[in-house]
Image (cartoon, rainbow, N blue to C red):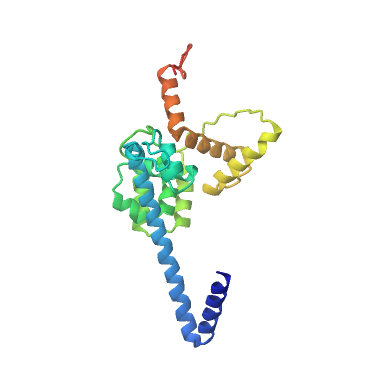
């Protein structure tokens, strides 16, 4: 394999070296355009993956699939993800979280955005008053329209979203300070999780308490998307766990 790669590298080197200066620039531009087209196609395919995952999750389509390993139908979506998901469980739930933000938005519009821009804009939709709402909020829809109308790139979209989230109409400016005690040997796991969250959603002053708080909230939201966690949460809510008085959760 290494020999073939070396031969290909030599062939490409020879071919480029034989080009005229004008041809070198033409070839360079052609390669740049090729990579751009491939990136755009990948962007659209991520959207299709996320929308397909949303249908699989919402309609429980995984219940109709048979495991090649056990020859039985899958009991949970996690079983299906582990065997047929084709990507990490964390990535699947990340795509699901984004797709849920676009409920009520035409599929062609989401496809036009592409994954990178759509993922940034989804941060605005999380400020809906009701997470189960079937229609996106107006601020979210206006941001989508502005992105497509002005042909904004990912960097411009991110800046727009950051500015929108800093607005008084989306931020209550009411904060709670929580004090947590963590074993020293467990701290690296917490730091790594926050580092991953910062990489996924970069924030200014990432070491500030507010930034850490935003990332911890995102991590908690992702955790609650897990079907097992969602089931327990529903039981707790029905048992009155978040109100006053005692509660009991049945198995």
Note whether residue 123 is visible: no
Q: Quadrant of residue 59?
A: top left
* Residue at image coords 34%, 54%: 111
Q: Is residue 119 left or right of residue 182?
A: left
Image quadrant for the N terminus?
bottom right
* Picture coordinates of residue 89, whole percent (x, y): 48, 42
Identified at 46% across, 73% down, the residue is: 31
Please state which of residues 142 and 206 is positioned toward the viewer in this rendering: 206
Q: Which one is in front, 30 or 49?
A: 49
State the residue lying farthest toward the right: 184
The C terminus lies in quadrant: top left
Q: Please provide percent x and percent y for residue 196.
A: 57, 45
**Residue 27 screen position, x and y as percent:** 46, 79
Residue 90 visible: yes
* Farthest top residue in view: 245
Decide which of 67, 175 is in the foreground and name it: 67
Q: Is residue 204 above or below residue 171?
A: below
Nearest the viewer among 73 and 196 is 73
Quadrant for residue 194, please give it: top right
User: Against 171, is 30 above or below?
Assistant: below
Residue 128: x and y in percent read 39, 36
Looking at the image, residue 13 lies above or below residue 203: below
Q: Quadrant of residue 95?
A: top left
């Amino acid at each position: 394999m290494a020999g073939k790669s070396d031969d290909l590298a030599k062939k490409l080197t020879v071919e480029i070296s034989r080009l005229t200066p004008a041809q070198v620039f033409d070839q360079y531009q052609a390669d740049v355009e090729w990579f751009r087209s491939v990136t755009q196609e990948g962007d659209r395919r991520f959207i299709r993956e996320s929308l397909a995952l949303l249908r699989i999750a919402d309609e429980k389509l995984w219940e109709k699939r048979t495991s090649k390993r056990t020859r039985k139908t899958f009991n949970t979506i996690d079983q299906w993800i582990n065997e047929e998901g084709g990507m990490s469980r964390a990535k699947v739930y990340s795509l699901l979280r984004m797709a849920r933000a676009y409920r009520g938005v035409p599929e062609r519009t989401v496809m036009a955005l592409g994954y990178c821009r759509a993922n940034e804009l989804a941060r605005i939709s999380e400020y809906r008053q009701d997470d189960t709402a079937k229609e996106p909020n107006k601020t979210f829809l206006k941001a989508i329209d502005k992105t497509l109308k002005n042909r904004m790139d990912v960097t411009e979209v991110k800046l727009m979203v950051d500015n929108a989230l800093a607005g008084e109409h989306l931020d209550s400016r009411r904060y709670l300070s929580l004090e947590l005690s963590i074993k020293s040997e467990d701290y690296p796991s917490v730091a790594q999780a926050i580092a991953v969250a910062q990489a996924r959603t970069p924030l200014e002053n990432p070491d500030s308490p507010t930034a850490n708080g935003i990332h911890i909230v995102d991590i908690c939201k992702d955790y609650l998307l897990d079907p097992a966690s969602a089931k327990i949460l529903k039981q707790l809510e029905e048992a009155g766990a978040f109100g006053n008085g005692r509660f009991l959760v049945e198995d």
